[in-house]
Amino acid sequence: MLRISGLSAGYSRIPVLNDLSVEVGEGQFVSIVGPNGAGKSTLFKTISGTVTPMAGSVTFEGRDLLSVAPDRRPHLGIAHVPEGRQVFASLSVMENLQMGAYTEAGRRDWKDNLDRILTWLPVLAERRNQPAGTLSGGEQQMVAIGRGLASSPKLLMLDEPSMGLAPAIADFIFDKLIEIRRQSKLTILLVEQRVAEALDSADHGYVLEAGRVVLEGNTRTLRADDRIRQAYLGM
């Protein structure tokens, strides 16, 4: 579904990503893990179009994504749930979800999508008329995920969904993502610092360090790798 090859990208001619190659198959749950500054968020911004690459290619369902204007990419079926949630604080939960449904598919499927979102994330039904800025961090993250789902995505990209959350709430969010993926067959690309949870959730993983892929494989293989166990799992 998504193929990234030889990608170099960054800011002010300074590359953050260096010759990066990543593939995400249809229906897969893929995690990209690594320390702060590894380039995880830059990768997502390049896919979404807010960062222009210096070299390499990005294709989505066989189409050259770099030739598609950033504002058209969500209409292809790519939803980006950004780092830090970035909900519309003064708008209600329901209005936030409606903001996500601006794509052609989102407008077409709004009723069905809303039913599914409120079933998966019932706290949003309870808080539907409450301003999103008054919610807890975990509830705001659920709003951000629901807003992404409202666009009827084929690929859901999640940037550090556990950031700033208590461990129990982060675990709940990961459990919900697994449930959503299982029931919808949605393709998910996750970047995350909580390596153990990210690898437990995924089929395939990539480890980024200094803008390069240093390890990749199925998550069982990665969890068994001594470098991962020592550097990221505290083992």
Image (spheres, rainbow, N blue to C red):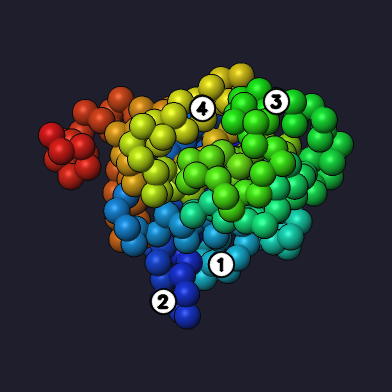
- The quadrant of the image that shows the C terminus is top left
Mark before the other along the chain sequence, 4 or 3: 3
In the image, residue 32 above or below residue 43: above
Q: Which residue is mark 3?
A: 116
For the residues labelled 2 and 1, say whether their Cβ atoms are less than 8 Å apart.
Answer: no
Q: Cα distance, mark 4 to mark 3?
A: 12 Å
Task: Name the residue nearer the viewer: 18 or 94.
Answer: 94
Mark before the other along the chain sequence, 2 or 4: 2
Q: Residues within 10 Å of mark 4 (few under 14, many from 20)?
A: some
Q: Residues within 10 Å of mark 3 (few under 14, many from 20)?
A: some
Q: Name the amino acid, label 1.
A: Val
Residue 2 spot, x, y in % from top left? 58, 43
- Does residue 50 appear to the left or right of 224 in the view shown? right
Mark before the other along the chain sequence, 3 or 1: 1
The kind of secondary structure element at disc 1 is loop
Residue 169 spot, x, y in % from top left? 41, 34
Which residue appears farthest toward the right when viewing the image? 108
Q: Name the amino acid, label 4.
A: Lys
| Residue mark closest to the camera, 3 vs 2 | 3
Q: Name the amino acid, label 2.
A: Ile
The kind of secondary structure element at disc 3 is helix
Q: Which residue is mark 4?
A: 176
Query: What's the residue at 31%, 39% (across, down)?
Result: 195
Q: Which residue is mark 1?
A: 51
Q: Name the amino acid, label 3.
A: Arg
Which residue appears farthest toward the bottom when viewing the image? 12
Residue 157 spot, x, y in % from top left? 56, 44
- Does residue 220 appear to the left or right of 70 in the view shown? left
